[in-house]
Amino acid sequence: MSSTDDAANDDEARMYASEKEDNFRWVARWLATTSSHVLTEGDRVDQQVEDAVSALAEFAEIAHGSMDPAWILDPQNRKILARDGFPLAGYRALAGMRDGELLENIILVEKFKGNIGNLQGYTALRMNPSTAARQTTDSGTIKPQVILAFSGTSNLTHGLYDLMMVPVQYQPVSNSEGHHDWKIHDGFQRVFQSIREPAIQALKLAIKQMEKEAPNGEWDLVITAHSLGSAVSSLFLLDLLRFEAAWNKSHLPGGDPEMPIIPSSTKVTIAKFGHPRVVNSSLADEYRAQIRRFRQRPEKEEALTDWNIICYMDGIPAAPPIKFGYVHLCERPFYLYHGRLYYVPDGEYENTLFTVEEADPQRETDFHPPLFPKGGHNYYGSRDMERLQRRMKAIMPDVKEERTNSQPAQSGSGQNSEGDTSGGSKSPPQHNDPTWVKHYLEREKEEALAWASKAREKGKNYWGLLRSILPITVLILFTVSRLAIV
């Protein structure tokens, strides 16, 4: 085994040893059903789509309630966070760099919270996206994107609402009618209703700003989230589509709609990661009917893209169980396995585990060893999502202390801050860096040393065990050999 393999194995061992959040692999073992269809290289998602999905997962990640998306999206902070060994290293959309400058101009518009557990969300403008928000063969047609992102479960309160699984009557909150057969997860509906109004106002602000900023006034809308947030995002999209349908039928010219009305030139993408089952089959039919109606626009299928990603051994998409009356909304999800994205065949969308044909390095041009082989709920976007949360949680106390002790002008100085952010395995602090950078590097060094020490101790323990059993083993072998001779 090469030194590179040894390093990769050590990094993987350290990653799994550092897990503190539940990845719900036990739920997958308990509830998930396995498809009889074997996914092969022919089921692989196009690289352009895979890159687009990975980029949108970045925006879903930083919505998590443990993080401050306003601080992360500040251009000066993004430049530092992009350095080698820092939290956003390898995040191409949020932290892609060229010649010391950020590749994407991302503008935070509004951060908002709901009334239940302070569920967090934000809106942002992605002015020059490096990836499209849908499948396309023409990279020159990528339009600016309005991003609406919701946090997943980030505290105990959210977890309690996740467990409120008894189906209840769907309660339309826009000017549209409901149906007595439409049933929904009680907890998800309550959480959605608590954050709906702040999300609407934040989205209106973002659209208003985008219409001023975007060339030719054309832009696309992206709704993205992970876990609980993905359930909320689906309910928000359903409400948005149903409101628009009712408004188009009944509104008077010059009226002020409660929810934003999507311009005819705007395409919508919803990207959901680790999405649980939310509604019954009757309400799922209404969701799909609204998508089909929206796709009657001139752009047809491209008018609305519904991406639902299921990761190998993530138990959340298998819950609540089908026997409770719940079904999935998206009929053509993607399956993320070992860092590769696959199309799920027609009719298999209720299955959340698939057998996958092992990749052949001789045939696969982008072959790489399996990434995150255990799978789980926190490995979407082919990244260790918990690692980002853990690092940002450690940074924020230093940031808050600096905010208290320094002038406000220290933050948000724009995209032309000085200093080259490229560096070695751990970029050293620069003379104009904030204090948190030094503390971050010190923590990273201490953690690396602690892990190395732990690994050495483990090796010593194995050697000590071997030395203790070796004499006994030799004695047993000697005795057996003597008996054989006799």
Image (cartoon, rainbow, N blue to C red):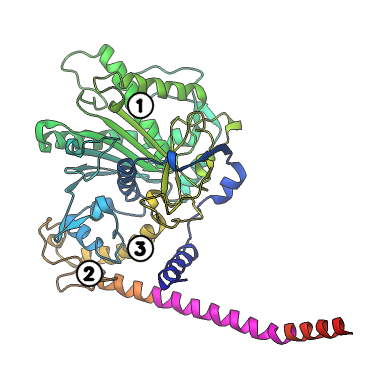
- In the rendering, at what x and y percent does residue 153 appear? 43, 47
Q: Amino acid at mark 3?
A: Arg
What's the distance in space between the residues labelled 2 and 1, CA to CA?
47 Å
Mark 2 lies on residue: 423
Residue highlighted by disc 1: 239
Q: Amino acid at mark 2?
A: Gly
| Image quarter hosting the C terminus | bottom right
* 101 versus 186 height, above or below: below
Residue bounds of the magenta highlight: 447-472
Give the number of the mark in front: 3 or 2: 2
First along the sequence among labels 1 and 3:
1
- Please name the residue that numbered disc 3 is placed on: 391
Report the residue at 23% width, 26% height from top: 262
Q: Is residue 82 above or below residue 36?
A: below
- Give residue 477's quadrant in the image: bottom right
Q: Is residue 147 magenta?
A: no
